[in-house]
Image: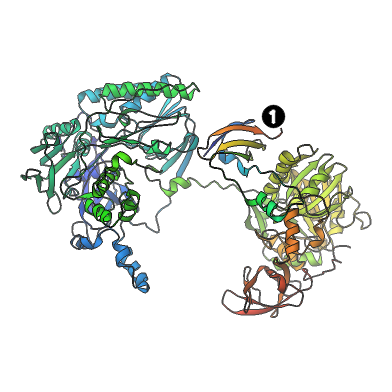
Amino acid sequence: MTLYRLEPRPGEVIDRSSEITFTWNGRIYSGYKGDTIASALAVNGVRLLSRSFKYHRPRGMLTATYHDPNAMVQVGSDPNVRSAHRLVEHGMSVTSQNTWPSLDFDIKAANQVIGRFLSPGFYYKTFMSPRWMWPWYQKVLSRFAAGGKVSADHEAAVFDHRYAHPDVLVAGGGPAGMAAAIAAADAGAKVILAEEEHQLGGHLRYGDADDLSALLELRTAILTRSNIEVMTDAVVTGRFDHNWVPIVQRSMDHVEERLVHARAKTLVVAAGLLERPYVFEGNDLPGVMLSTAVRRLINLYGVKPGNRAVILTSNPEGDAAAADLERAGVEIVAVIDTRQGNTVTKAAGRKGVKQVTDSSGRTHDADLLVTAIGWTTPTSLLNMAGDRPAYDKQAARFVSTSLPDEVMAAGGMTGNGSTQELVDQGTATGTEAARRANGDPPAPVSKLKTGQQPELYRSSTHGFVDFSEDVTSRDLFLAAAEGYDSMELAKRYTTAGMGPVQGKVEAVNALAVHGEAIGASLLETATTTWRPPYAPIRLGTLAGRKHDPVRYSPMHSWHETHGARPLLAGQWVRPEHYGDPAAEVKTVRESVGIIDVSPLGKIDLRGTDVSKLLEFVYVNKWSRLDVGKVRYGIMCAEDGVIMDDGVTGRLGPDHYMMTTTSGGAGGVWNWLDDWLQTGFPEWDVKMTAVTDGYASINVAGPMSRELVDRLADIDLRPDAFGYMEVRMGTVAGVDDCFVWRIGFTGELSFEIHVPANHGLEIWEKLLAEGKDLGVGPFGIEAQRIMRLEKGHFIVGQDTDGLTQGFGVGVDWAIKMDKPDFAGKPELAFQSERGDYPRLVALQTEDPAIVPPEASQIIDGEAGIVGRITSSRMSPTLDRSICLAQVAHNLASAGQQLNIRLPNGATVPARVMEHHAHFDPEGTRLRV
Amino acid sequence: MLLIKCPHCGPRNSNEFTYNGEVIPRPGMDVDPSMWRRYLYMKTNAAGWQSERWFHVSGCRRFLLIERNQDTNEIRMIRAYGSQS
């Protein structure tokens, strides 16, 4: 098919019968199903994948894994796609990012030439002054920012969440992880096995014939066990308290990505080892690759990674890479073995390796330099479990030191071993993990012995330490010379380790080089810190699907078919109005209107001690409330801040019905439960939340008595049913209703509460029976206007998180002579202090100007002295009306104030004598 | 996400609960402002074991008394208010 595709390999993961075409920077290429974007490009001889972050240097594949720092590309409108991991798809449009005008010819590569100016702290040092130039600097610099492009019309994808409760969760599907899963399953555990790559097997996948047959055996064993759930292309991104383990599952059929929230009884971490790059001059040139990268390319994808190779090896894996390359027909120009005291000092070339210099000064012409100089232990999940890994000099890598019982490490993370040794250690770990999940006392599991690995970090020359952030070993030396003698500081100064790869490739090299620069071996004293997430999580994955339930009243269907404009109030969908709120106000003020107030919080309270509870949670008095009476009450929290208000009626000697604001219903219910359970458990109070049990309709207006009388089997005459009274009875043939006479709108009104399933029926009957009276529905906007005309405040609208009881002008209701109630001491301090803001009614001089809510009230010298909390045009008074919070010294009636409008204009206004703009005596209520 | 073993409902995720803070006894009504504000605002926030109150709002709706280590999030004791164990 192409120049670099090899003959079929026994372990390859591509399907040669299924060809895929895609574009790369507009040119059409082809690969096979199973190819990653990067392997499909490599097959076509494309080595240059990206330009580096700062210097725009040419970059090619380094690790050939998800964590390859050089392989980020744009796929369609998806930026920052990991091309050495993402499988290529038919018709995919892939482009390089961070290049201009093109990948091959990048103008910003001039940064290389002026690279000495881009040393650590360059931005801090250069763009410090003059300060007024910063906006301009910022504009220019933002054009140099790395990364892909986010499209504004990117199509929203669907993401999902799932909750899982495995006994044993194994992170990592290499030989040890697979063996651990099998052993745990055989011990009866429910197991999840999560593997970051596309197939189980880890390094066995690109190993020799023995490795492949061991892999086949393990895979078969897993397939035959129904209690193992395998997730591939699924990365465990963290470990949180009580073994709460998120897994990001990619390559799902039905969703873009899925976040699995797993609560694992035991977590087995078998993350294997990451190969570490070597620091030397030219180590970032395309064609310089890790030994595991070339083995992946050859054995998984059938890609010939180059024509003439130099191999730098220090371990058996490097030797195996040399053998693989030879079998793949790559000419081996030189094998430089560090175990014989040789190393590489330089790779040279323009857009790729052309020549390699070794430590004896010899040069070799080659287009591929393969390095195998050691490993990094990805202890990420172990760190998050509290481990502080320590450096093992013999193995030249960090190893785990201490773990909680519910987290175990397995396989290569614990040491080195043959395939059989890895499997045996994994098996022992898996068996023990299942025992621990079962609650058995923990027993130790022996670790593998760490093998010999020469310590190799930097050659005699300087090269790149952090490929994603373009930080060189020279930069780290310079930072040390400038006084950054702590790794934590040097890291932040140079940004080494702060790029998208997050330390997996560069952290240990940075630590070693920084130690070298300050003349101390940091490796032996420091530890590596890995924070969640181990791999990036898309914001969509975190968000998942939108699950925002809403609540409907029993009359919702009627509102929908009668032109109600829906308004989301808390969770409730309520009618804001039915077309014309001012007309609705007129209907109520002149004849009669009905409003659906079903969302009102309703709490049924029974028992001999209910009045004690009311006395405690409300600021006013409740002990002498007779049966058949209702009372308005205000609740304050212990800090004296108003938390809710509402009316409560006494339905029987030991039976009360409390109402709360719609938004406060849940909070009040919890608040009462708190006091009843933790404060006064001896009280006889039974509480039931019955908000949804009743449909509630407020019938308001001068004709309301006549309308309700046509339906209710209750004596409504004024002397039989007075203001602030409650009656139980039958309404339109429906039993178990209660009706109370209250007046939020300022009109004569009866609030009817009926069993919810009769709500719609009674709503419709009220409208039908009242036709001749001119009845009409009204929405919450009309109700808000009318309550503002009456000066009734709304908790949370006219009060805020600092408004204490005395701040709303209802001092008469706060009974400081009660021995105890919630918030009493703080209210006493407030009253003594006296300097709190007051809620007042305001009218603007110009009746046509309605200052928007939250407009500031200004007083020349003092500045802001208050704000408008509610404002409307009153259809009844035909002028603008407001409630406002103002400073205490400006709150007396007749005070002139200035309101600053959002457009900067100032309008004069006057403090009114009463909160009520309309009918302050309340004569309309008491008819 | 902590795992809280509710005595009524069994082990549940902490997002079923509300955290009502460390247990501080409520002073009498006749205290001076500083004492009352200590009760309201001055939490000990110990680096170690703490007695605290949780509310299983999306479960049995019982208030629980919990001893939790704020360093490690280990939970060593849970009991419902009004019960002895």
The chain carrying label 1 is B
- Disc 1 marks which residue? B84
Q: From this viewpoint, is residue A490 visible?
A: yes
Between residue A807 and residue A854, name the one nearer to us. A807
Up the image or down, A536 lies above or below A265; here it is below
Image spot of residue A839 (x, y percent): 72, 67
Between residue A398 and residue A115, name the one nearer to us. A398
Characterize the local packing of mark 1: few (<14), some (14-19) or many (20 or more) Cα atoms within 10 angstroms: few
* Residue at x 85% of width, y 45% of height: A651
Horizontal side, residue A628 vs residue A563: left or right: right
Residue A910 lies in quadrant: bottom right
The quarter of the image holding the C terminus of chain A is bottom right
The colouring scheme, among rainbow, by chain, secondary structure or one colour, is: rainbow
Image spot of residue B55 (x, y percent): 64, 40
The quarter of the image holding the N terminus of chain A is top left
Residue A301 lies in quadrant: top left
Residue extending farthest left:
A362
Image spot of residue A594 (x, y percent): 76, 58
Up the image or down, A664 lies above or below A525; here it is below
Residue extending farthest right:
A719
Q: Amino acid at mark 1?
A: Gln
Between residue A375 and residue A106, name the one nearer to us. A375
Residue extending farthest top:
A187
Between residue A663 and residue A638, name the one nearer to us. A638
Image spot of residue A913 (x, y percent): 79, 73
Up the image or down, B66 lies above or below A786; here it is above
Up the image or down, A56 lies above or below A427; here it is below
Q: From this viewpoint, is residue A731 visible?
A: no
Secondary structure type for disc 1? loop
Q: For the image shown, how many numbered marks are present on the structure? A: 1
